Image: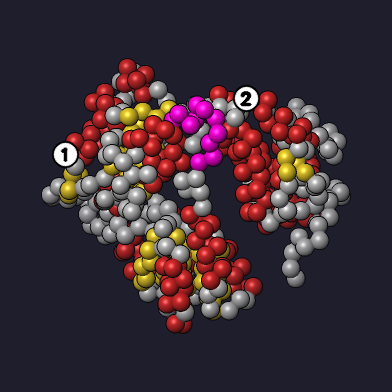
Amino acid sequence: MRLLIIGDLEGQIGAAARIAMERGARVAHVDTLEAAFEALRAGQGADLVMVDVRLDIAHLVKGLKSERINAPVVACGVGNETRIAVQAIRAGAKEYVPLPPSVELIAAVLEAVTEENTALIVRDPKMLAVLKIADQIAPSDAGVLITGASGTGKEMLARYVHEKSKRKGHRFVAVNCAAIPETLLESELFGYEKGAFTGAVARRIGKFEEARGGTLLLDEISEMDIRIQAKLLRAIQEREIDRLGGNQPVKVDVRILATSNRILEDEVAQGRFRQDLFFRLNVVNLNIPPLAERPEDIPFLAEHFARKLAEANGVKPQAISAEAMAKLKSHPWPGNVRELENTLHRAVLLSAGPEIGPEVIVVGGSRPTAAAAPGAGGLVGRTVAEVERDLIIDTLTHCLGNRTHAANILGISIRTLRNKLKQYSEEGYAVPTPREGDRPSA
């Protein structure tokens, strides 16, 4: 993985860098935020950014987001003062690491970032057949089109192909074509020169150049505008790109992988996707079956997610009961592996017994069977505020009063949840009390 460290950290920077390098990270160091932005714009790339807590973390996080540079930020500082750590998290850091650095803590942070980028949990014969083809074609430079429904794990398979290829020592760069507006995707892929358009205050290296020597994944390529498809085709054919505002082509050396949850032959027939580009991308097709068609994967994936999510949420790992597993096996999983993971996340947070039982397996629009809030089932004739109140209190009840777990399930911040609960309590509604250890600090 690539680690970018920003700041001085009172001489502790060398120790942190050495620990990271001993764990296999490629480490770069700059002193200021501006130097960090310049390095990232120049295509240096980073899988993780560690920054001195005394620098403007909010500015860093906002800048990374505005420039669509996807790299989690971890704050570092001398000492372990809670107030400083909280300020860093509120500013947008994912974690706070006290210095002098602990070998175990640095290793844990690096592992959390790189964990399971390429680990595939596969037992079903249909999926094993897909992996066999992937193993065969991975060492080549052939274009690969990975198809399958949303949530089946297309990006995971792309990373797997990269790690099995001769380019594995170089970068894997992913671009989500569906998430970037059409007006920005061209500059994201090909980069731009200073002054190319309003707001282009410095040269920015595009994803083609950032992935040099490695692999470029074009995720959900069917969402790409047909005008940009023409420029992409030229880049693949000629192995060169033109930066916006540039006056000479730039040679590039990347392997192209692409994913789509649509049938590209149909998109070609409808005139929404170029046929010549389709042929360029579809040298090899890896089609991932939906989870419902690979039933032997379900129990292994479920057990894997139960262990992983228990650890991530700081709860004791629990086995999945036979009744709960039967419920998991019988569900059709329209959301595929992503839906299964979300289901196990809820189950891990809601389960209070010695094992995960069927009552906390929430699938297909069902709800946990215990302690349902009175009147929460009917929606017609009720206000949004009433429904929201019952949903929040009901979820908190199922979490045994644990605010943190309830906020995770509801998808809101702990601060928003506490403000809502304060309001409900003042209005006279019964609010479950916090569990021991979940009370806000004074």
- Range of magenta residues: 120-130
From the viewer's side, name the closer residue of 265 and 295.
295
Give the left or right position of residue 193, taking residue 302 as reference: left
For the point 43% across and 72% down, the residue is: 17
Q: Is residue 51 above or below residue 8?
A: above
Q: x, y (%) of residue 48? A: 45, 60
Badge 1 local density, few (<14 within 10 Å), some, or many (20+)? Answer: few
Q: CA distance from mark 1 to mark 2?
A: 45 Å
Q: Is residue 125 magenta?
A: yes
Kindly identify which residue carries mark 1: 238
Q: Is residue 138 magenta?
A: no
> Looking at the image, is mark 1 or mark 2 earlier in the sequence?
1
Q: x, y (%) of residue 39? A: 31, 63
Kind of residue at disc 1? Glu
For the point 34% across and 39% down, the residue is: 138
Colouring method of the image? secondary structure
Q: x, y (%) of residue 395? A: 76, 44
Kindly identify which residue carries mark 2: 332
For residue 345, which quarter of the picture? top right
Kind of residue at disc 2? Pro
